Image (spheres, rainbow, N blue to C red):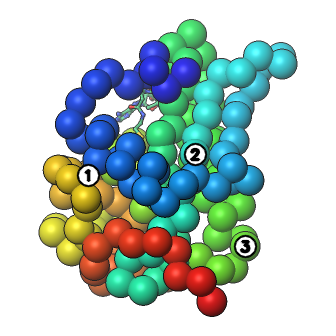
Amino acid sequence: MQAIAFGPGRFAKTAYRIRERFNIDESLSLIAEVEGQSCGSVWMTPISIGGINGWMLGPLATHPNFRKLGAGKLLAREVTKRALARGDGEFVMLVGDRDYYCPLGWEPTTLGNIAFPGPVDPTRVLVYGEDKSLAETLTGAIAAWVQG
Ligand SMILES: CC(C)(COP(=O)(O)OP(=O)(O)OC[C@H]1O[C@@H](n2cnc3c(N)ncnc32)[C@H](O)[C@@H]1OP(=O)(O)O)[C@@H](O)C(=O)NCCC(=O)NCCS
């Protein structure tokens, strides 16, 4: 699914690096189905930024045959709701298109505040948090989830 949806690219490699380093949380990885057939998927990686725990969402991908049916938005909303309901992480960060994610509640971050282990377009670094000031204030390098 993701191999079909994403071409090779240096920005994508930065996200791969984070997922490799910090491991995805399989209990927060969802697959959307239509009549029993997989049509989309999303992964979450536990991380911390500036000592605050949260998740990086991605990749989010819908199979080309099933696009524009609402699967992508449903997956992004649902995985974010499930993650934040756990109560031990405060944000869901992702690198993606503002036009797609901001209507769902993600907000642009302060440019350059979040340091990635590789190149990233800072205008595409978006954060969802119940605390709406987090998108502006979250600062630091992406690090491992801080064990309580
Ligand atoms: C982006 C993606 C996940 C959307 O999946 P989807 O299941 O078609 O999404 P939805 O059905 O929930 O939403 C579709 C709507 O979003 C719009 N949309 C899709 N990609 C968009 C983007 N990058 N920017 C703005 N709007 C976008 C569609 O035009 C459509 O609009 P409409 O409802 O007015 O027709 C899918 O196109 C995909 O897998 N793309 C390749 C991988 C990718 O770019 N992933 C996102 C980065 S993490």
* Foreground: disc 2 or disc 1: 2
Viewer-closest of 124 and 20: 20
Q: Callout 1: helix, strand or loop?
A: helix
In the image, residue 25 above or below residue 71 = below
**Where does label 2 land, which residue?**
43
The quadrant of the rendering that contains the N terminus is: top right
Where, by quadrant of the figure, is residue 122 drawn? Answer: bottom left
Residue type at mark 1 is: Arg
- Count residues near mark 3 (Cα–Cα under 10 Å), then give few for <14, some for 14-19, many for 20+: few
Where, by quadrant of the figure, is residue 49 drawn? Answer: bottom left
Residue at the (49%, 26%) spot, across then down = 2
* Ligand number 1: quarter of image: top left
Q: Earlier in the sequence, mark 3 or mark 2?
A: 2
Does residue 9 appear to the left or right of 131 in the view shown? left
**Where does label 3 land, which residue?**
86
Residue at the (49%, 60%) spot, across then down = 22
Residue at the (28%, 79%) spot, across then down = 140
Q: Earlier in the sequence, mark 2 or mark 1?
A: 2
**Where does label 1 land, which residue?**
124
Q: Callout 3: helix, strand or loop?
A: loop
Residue type at mark 3 is: Arg
Residue 21 on image: x %, y %: 43, 56
Residue 63 on image: x %, y %: 55, 18
Residue at the outermost front position:
21
Residue 114 on image: x %, y %: 26, 70
Residue type at mark 2 is: Trp
